[in-house]
Image: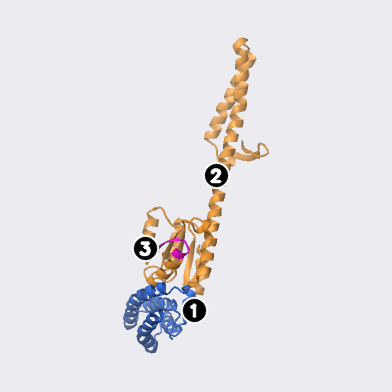
């Protein structure tokens, strides 16, 4: 599992219906933020990199997917420090695993 | 849940992250609050600058937003509403603690971290609303007390000379007496002076003194 099941259930009081509804919002929102993050990385706009990575981190944190949250946070720090060398590995984690996280969450909620 | 505090309380969430805002909204709605969400602070700030009435009891304000930072929004809010009139709770990620002190100094009432812990959030919201309600009650009570004191003052200052004037003039109806007429005129003159003083009254010219066991009055200097 890419997310902490017990923390997720505790956070939403075991309300799988609510989680299901929020997964759909997450699915739409993360794609928008990830695209904006990739654009800002290409442009090397550090302020926007920090901001979009931060937003993505916040979204992921709601589902307790620590590895992905950490990847977003690493890019956020890079933006904050205006030093983005090596961001590709963190971005790859997000790019590859976010769709998997959505699929796992959907499967979990049945 | 404390029904007295949450009943009809209206809460505004300002957060660019639609997902987090939605989660917070759902959780707080479930707990009995009426919740509005804005994904940008700009429409709210526009209304605030135009002095339109604020229909929210408390704001949850995200710190990091694209068009204007939560910190700048807070500074703008505090130009129009103090932290008792409109409590603001900053919402931060757990890594943003460095900005919290700055936000509290700028007039934030409290802060909570994302992902939102419902129990913590509710406790902090409830505390701010209770403080706001208590202050509001205390101000209303002070206003009522001030009005009562003014009424007592007017009664005392005007009724006494009026009684003297009426008493002396009543006697003069049957038996004219220059001394009594003079006393009545002095009493009426006293009332005229008091009315003039009341017209020009300022706080520095008044001293609140005890009138009876349960009532105070202002001594007009």
Give SS at disc 3: helix
Q: Which residue is mark 3?
A: B42
Image quadrant in which the C terminus of chain B is located: top right
Q: Which residue is mark 2?
A: B143
3 or 1: mark nearer the eye: 1
Do the residues at pointers 3 and 2 share their chain? yes
Q: Residue at x 41, y 52 (%)?
A: B53
Q: Residue at x 56, y 33 (%)?
A: B197
Q: Is residue A85 visible?
A: no
Q: Which residue is mark 1?
A: A7
Q: Which chain is blue?
A: A
Is B31 one of the magenta-colored residues? yes
Give the magenta-colored segment's residue range. B28-37
Q: Residue at x 62, y 40 (%)?
A: B207
Tell me where residue A74 sits by quadrant: bottom left
Q: Which chain is disc 2 placed on?
A: B
Residue at the outermost top position: B175
Give SS at disc 2: helix
């Amino acid at each position: 599992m890419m997310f902490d099941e017990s923390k997720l259930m505790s956070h939403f009081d075991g309300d799988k219906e609510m989680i299901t509804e929020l997964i759909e919002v997450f699915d739409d929102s993360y794609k928008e933020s990830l695209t904006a993050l990739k654009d800002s990385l290409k442009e090397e706009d550090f302020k926007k990199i920090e901001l979009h990575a931060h937003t993505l981190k916040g979204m992921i944190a709601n589902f307790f997917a620590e590895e992905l949250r950490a990847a977003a946070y690493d890019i956020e720090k890079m933006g904050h420090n205006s030093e983005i060398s090596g961001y590709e590995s963190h971005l790859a984690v997000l790019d590859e695993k976010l769709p998997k996280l959505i699929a796992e969450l959907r499967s979990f909620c049945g | 849940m404390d029904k007295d505090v949450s009943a009809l309380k209206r809460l505004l969430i300002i957060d660019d992250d639609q997902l987090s805002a939605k989660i917070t909204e759902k959780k707080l709605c479930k707990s009995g609050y009426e919740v509005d969400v804005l994904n940008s602070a700009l429409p709210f700030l526009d209304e605030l600058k135009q002095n339109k009435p604020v229909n929210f009891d408390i704001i949850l304000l995200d710190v990091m937003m694209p068009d204007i930072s939560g910190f700048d929004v807070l500074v703008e809010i505090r130009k129009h509403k103090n932290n008792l009139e409109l409590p603001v709770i900053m919402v931060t990620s757990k890594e943003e603690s460095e900005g919290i002190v700055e936000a509290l100094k700028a007039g934030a009432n409290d802060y909570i971290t994302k992902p939102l812990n419902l129990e913590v959030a509710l406790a902090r919201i409830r505390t701010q609303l209770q403080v706001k309600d208590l202050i509001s009650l205390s101000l209303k009570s002070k206003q009522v007390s001030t009005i009562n004191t003014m009424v007592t003052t007017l009664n005392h200052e005007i009724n006494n000379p009026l009684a003297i004037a009426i008493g002396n003039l009543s006697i003069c109806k049957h038996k004219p007496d220059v001394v009594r007429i003079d006393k009545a005129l002095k009493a009426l003159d006293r009332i005229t002076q008091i009315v003039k003083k009341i017209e020009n009254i300022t706080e520095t010219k008044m001293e609140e003194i005890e009138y009876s066991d349960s009532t105070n009055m202002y001594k007009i200097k």
